[in-house]
Amino acid sequence: MTAHTPQERHSLQQAAPTLPASPVPPPPARRPPVLATPGQILGAAAALAREWAPQAPARDRERRLPWTEIEAYSASGLWGITVPQAHGGPGADAWTLAQTIATVSAADGSLGHIPQNHFYALEVLRVGGTEAQQRFFHGRVLQGERFGNALSETGHRDYRRRTRLERSGSGWVLHGRKSYCTGAIFAHWIPTQAMQQLDDGREASVIAFVPRHAPGVTVEDDWDGMGQRVTGSGSVALDGVRVEPEWIVPFQASFERPTAIGPFAQIMHAAIDLGIGEGALQAALPFIRTRARPWIDAQVEHATDDPLTLHAVGDVDLRLRAARAMLRRAARFVDTARHAPDEDAVAAASVAVAEARALAHRAGLLAANKLLELGGTSATAAEHGFDRFWRNVRTHTLHDPVRWKYHAVGNYLLNGTRPPRHGAL
């Protein structure tokens, strides 16, 4: 069997015929810029958010997958911001990443959510990948390629993974079916969680970076959730998909020692909830000023003078600002844990992010609720699409149960018990 480099294998598989259920994204037209500073990163995010916000209601209403927006998103350089400086990227810190996601989520919750798993896969690669793997995949990202995900499985009550990597000659073959695969439709690579038998006979969970176009990969656009409707969170079928050894990164092993993978993943989810809430408040203010009516008992002429409306707007703003402050605080803990991961630093980061996630959860839902309440019946008109804020934040906050965030925080503060290490805390 002729040996090929990872780059050669990738090129060979690009030429392989495939009939996926959803279109395969084209290769990047050109290399994106490297956004070297937080100012450049946040400026690019703000510019895209301004461009995308006006069409967010139509995308949601028509369930129009944002292919054009995703191409512009990665072409902007924003999908490469966490690539380390040693490999040619800017190595953005956690706060810059969180602000980027919140900014885009305020314009469109789905667009804020789609790259979350891309950045998560990059963190898994940073922690568990070899130097050669990191250089290869970091290079692909800097060329404009995107990662999706195929992690979750449904159809059974436990959390054991049924997707398996089986040895085949000098490589491996992947079999399984995945659900809630956010971003897989738009991806060039689909990081897939699978069980692999090790040389000593044990099984371990790994992440296999699977080319989106590989024979045996079928991505189905079957996500029909009430919110986050255009995240492309459908299912992925993997039927005898060839996986090269160089594309397999340890996953379970990265949680058997203290690493910041979990809080790094979760801080992005907190940023999504915060951003959707901030977007709801941004939508509410002009509507209240120009369209809402004061309640009769307020005995005022304008809704902007209604004392209970003023109280509610102030309450929402305060809670969103508090959530943003907690998010910024949590980002400092995450950066500390990423740079010097030990038991105490990782536990502190997990708790800080859990606090931020819990507060962003409540603030986001409150803002989305109050947009409709304060806007009144006219705010429910389909032309405005205001219901998308509530549907988006309610759907996204179900990603993992916030009630367990409170448990983790309380157990840590009261009993000194460190939180469990996994990607959902």
Image: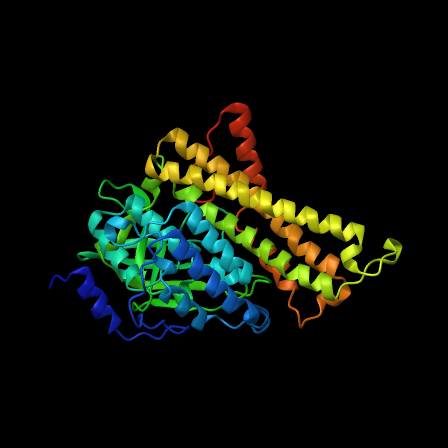
Where 363 sits versus 240, above or below? above
Residue furthest top as drawn: 415
Going 80% across and 60% down the picture, which residue do you hit? Answer: 302
Q: Estimate the x, y position of residue 287 in percent, counting from the top left.
A: 70, 64
Q: Quadrant of residue 31?
A: bottom left
- Give the quadrant of the N terminus: bottom left
Query: Measured from the top left, where is residue 299 in percent x and y?
Result: 88, 56
Residue under the point 64% across and 61% down: 283
Say whether residue 232 is visible.
no
Camera sees residue 212 = yes
Picture residue at 86% right of the left edge, 54% below the top: 298
**Residue 235, x across and y down, in percent:** 45, 63
Q: How many marks?
A: 0
Q: Position of residue 414 (x, y in %)?
A: 55, 25
In the rendered image, which quarter is residue 246 located in? bottom left
Near-viewer residue (61 or 331): 331
Q: Which residue reaches farthest left?
A: 2
Whether residue 179 is situated above or below residue 94 in the rendered picture? below
Q: Is residue 116 above or below residue 56?
A: above
Q: Identify the residue at image location x=28%, y=64%.
A: 143
